[in-house]
Amino acid sequence: MLFNSYEFIFLFLPITLFIYFLLNKKRLTYASKGWMVLASLFFYSWWNILYLPLILGSILVNFTVGSTISKMESLRSPSKKAFSPKTLLTFGILSNLFLLGYFKYMDFFITNANMVLGMHWELMHIILPLGISFFTFTQIAYLVDAYRGEVKEMDYLNYTLFVTFFPHLLAGPILHHKEMMPQFDGLKNKVIQYKNISAGLFLFSIGFFKKVIIADTFSVWANTGFDTTSALNLLEAWATSLSYTFQLYFDFSGYTDMALGVALLFNIRLPVNFNSPYKALNIQDFWRRWHITLSRFLRDYIYIPLGGNRSGELRTYANLFSVFLIGGLWHGASWMFVAWGALHGSAIVLHRAWQQTGLSVSRFFGWFITFNFVNITWVFFRAKDWDQAANVLHGMIFGDIIVSEKLEKHLNVLKSAGIEFGQFMIHLGGSASTWIWIVSAFILVIATPNSNSLTQRFYPSKFNLAAIVIVLLDALLHLSKNSEFLYFNF
């Protein structure tokens, strides 16, 4: 089920909210958690009920392994157990990676094995279960936290609620057990908090608007541009890359805003996942702002276990590059994602090396380099193959400059500079309004407060209520049934 659907907004959400707080009001706490689990599983099954046993089996295995690890004796004490905590942790992590690898990477492996070995194995055409990348990483984090002694309580219902809580289930944020479960047990969180209701609706409306009005508008130009890459001129190529850059941001940050907003209706605060990433002044700053919970996971559960920065500069560079390579592959089974991860890994290494020199650049130049690097590397992230990426990049650098033929009589002098006049933005199905949208998006992401800041300043009032209603109605009127979130595919 999608957040941006009539079924979710008018049926699922209000019914789930009403029954949850009704059960809590009657002090049926365990029943309220059970209801939330059932509602979340229904939410997940709406897309394809065949994958319900998959997530339930994954939850059972991980809870069993994690609870067993937590109950074992101290890691430094002699153990009479058949298996040590470390062995169980290894088993749990490998089980999760096997599940993720089978569903997400099996066809990728077969394709490359056929290419390298000259074989003709048939592809399995496995449909990727929604949210598998997120609930897999969430549970790996739980197992490691259990091994480190950071998981204090063990209850199967609580654990199932932690994994399946529907606002974060399909596309994050990636959570820690310790930051979630105490909130469900807090007495104040069991009753309706009207301040949280109003703030949650406010945040949900911002995310809804981002997705339906902004991201879905850019998606038309981005999709058309990447489908006609060989024909793009310079302005069209830049419009294509920038359209995807803004589509991806407003789509994913819009989903996250909606997730945080919905969770807040239940008095649950999910971790912030975006903090104006396109304002970043360097690539390290970008990754502290973009998909923050993924960056946190990669740092805590891959970079630090690899040795972090404790074994000299060369090892640090290797660790940083490896983390981003893994992060790229996590996004999808394609060499394009690997290339994207490698580019960002290389940029992080170069940034660290630059810091060692003690040199600095102006804030504007730092932002300019960072934004353009991110925009260019998104081309690899979006392109289906190397040819598509090469065509877009070629157009951005060497493409002809073609402006609207309507301006020819006014700007005829520009012909001497090699500028041509003709049909403007034709290969994107766009027009001059496309660039108005791009400039407006720049202003939104660079010069205005982000949704986190706006929500912190929010207070219930008639004006703010009217603003929420207007934004929601506008987005509802533009709602498309075929508008899925991009990160559902990652």
Image (cartoon, rainbow, N blue to C red):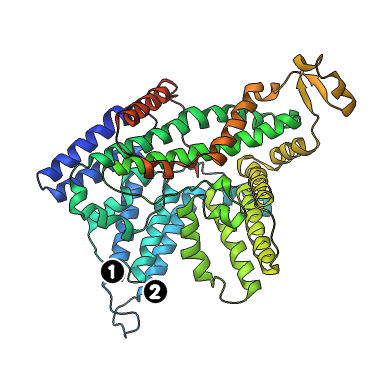
Task: Tell me the number on the disc at residue 455.
Answer: none
Number of numbered tags placed on the structure image: 2
Quadrant housing the N terminus: top left
Observer-nearest residue: 243 or 469? 469
Identified by mark 2, the residue type is Lys
| 292 over 475 or under it: above or below | below
x then y, percent, for residue 376: 67, 44
x then y, percent, for residue 48: 37, 37
Q: Is residue 296 left or right of residue 113?
A: left
Q: Is residue 413 left or right of residue 268?
A: right
Residue picked out by circle 2: 86
Camera sees residue 127: no
Element on which disc 1 rests: helix
Camera sees residue 94: yes
Q: CA distance from mark 2 to mark 1?
A: 11 Å
x then y, percent, for residue 105: 53, 50
Residue picked out by circle 1: 68
Observer-nearest residue: 154 or 218? 218
